[in-house]
Amino acid sequence: MRTAGCPEEKILSFLSSQKAKDRCYRKVLSSMCTLPHPLAVKVQEMFIESNLGDPGLFQGTAEIETLLTEELGSLLHLSGVCGYATSGGTESNIQALRIARKAKPVASPNVVVPESAHFSFEKACDLLGLEMRTVPSDGRYRMDVDAAERFIDDQTIALVGIAGTTEYGVVDPIERLAELALERQVHLHVDAAFGGLVLPFLEDAPVFDFRLDGVASISVDPHKMGMSTIPVGCLLTREESMLCALNVDTPYLTVKKEFTLAGTRPGGAVVGAWAVLQLLGRDGFTRIVRECMDRTRLLIDGMEGYGYPVVVEPEVNVAAFECPNTPEGWQVSRTRDGHMRIVCMPHVSTQAIENFLHDIGEMNV
Ligand code: PLP
């Protein structure tokens, strides 16, 4: 560490040059995060010092965390939902598997997850000493439920389904998984980190939420399609006892027990997430999600017009293509199978899609 402090201008000038190295979102087509809503930014600043890890000191902030989980719970059809704001999908998925493991303390626990699962499940299984049983997809990038059934045994503590897969934007057959979970008495966790703030605003979306009795917990991330600042995820559980099973004693805090994974937690981002839900309401979200889906359609039609078929028709605003090359200057990503993957987040405007398609066309000449 330096002995004498550095002048602020010098620090800010260094930081500006570092910031200039970051990609601006304009040509980023690979991210599941987006530019935060201006209200989220404003509110984050207002609550910048709030620490949800010691809720007795920040009672107003803590009450808003409850309002946020209640709001998301009602969107996902469970009044009296329990939950809390996590740092994102990874933490929510880890905590969901912790809950499942506590509920079923077997000798050699395993978890049955789809092939398409986000890599956070690999981290969770490693941390928790769980065997991860990966179920192949049905050929349409969705979990093969018949195969999943064969993977479950008396040591299975949880079954996982994805509502809006990271790579192909599809939804696993959650209704069938929920029936299977009830039949085999395993915890069904639905990872809707991405789709949880898309599917509720679409007509004819598949049912993936607490309307299904077999669904025990859900991950849903405001810092993805909820346009909050980073980090805000949410873990929602059907029963309070599920979260309480994770409680540890916290003798020196204003509360005596804590079930969260992180200790100190940022209140500002959480309040910002709630504020954006209030500001936009169902109408605002429906409009934004509709725009993202329309742009996904525009992209698919354009790509197919150039001879690059979509790999599977997506159910959310993520599309993957059989297109080996990437036009200069654009940030796309590649799936495990090497397909070009594009996420039509709110920052990906119609103009951006048109420009991208133009550059794809140029690549062909
Ligand atoms: N689950 C799904 C379906 C995701 O798409 C992602 C991230 O893209 C995650 C979990 C992990 O979320 P985070 O990066 O916020 O931890």
Image (cartoon, rainbow, N blue to C red):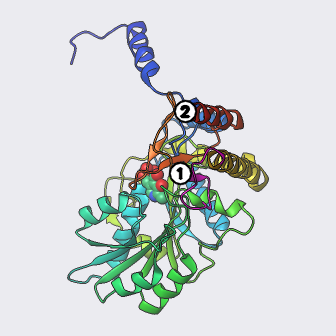
Evaluate whether residue 131 shows in this view: yes
Q: Is 145 colored magenta in this rendering?
A: no
**Residue named by callout 1:** 321
The stretch of residues the image draws in magenta is 305-319
Q: Can residue 223 be seen in this view?
A: no
* Quadrant of the frame with the C terminus: top right
Judge: label 2 CB < 8 Å from ligand 1.
no
Residue beneath the point at 38% across and 8% down: 10
Q: Which residue is drawn at 50% across and 51% down?
A: 322
The x and y percentages for residue 318 are 57, 52
Q: Quadrant holding ligand 1?
A: bottom left
Residue 311 belongs to magenta span: yes
Q: Position of residue 3 (x, y in %)?
A: 21, 12
Residue 61, placed above or below residue 244: above
Asked whether disc 2 touches disc 1, contact meaning CB atoms under 8 Å apart, the reply is no
For residue 363, the mark is 2
Q: How crowded is mark 2: few (under 14 residues within 10 Å), some or many (20 or more)?
A: few
Q: Is residue 303 above or below residue 152?
A: above
Q: Which of marks 2 and 1 is nearer the N terminus?
A: 1
Q: Looking at this view, is 49 or 282 the one in front?
A: 282
Circle 1: residue type: Phe
The Cα–Cα distance between marks 2 and 1, rounded to whole angstroms, is 15 Å
Q: Badge 1: how crowded within 10 Å, few (<14), some, or many (20+)?
A: many
Amino acid type, mark 2: Met
Q: In which quarter of the image is residue 108?
A: bottom left
Left or right placement of residue 333 versus residue 60 in this view: left
Q: Where residue 128 appears, x then y in whole percent? A: 26, 66
Q: Residue at x 35, y 63 (%)?
A: 121
Q: In this view, does 198 lie above or below 229?
A: below
At 61% from the left and 35% from the top, the residue drawn is 361
Q: Judging from the image, what secondary structure is the residue with disc 1 in?
A: strand
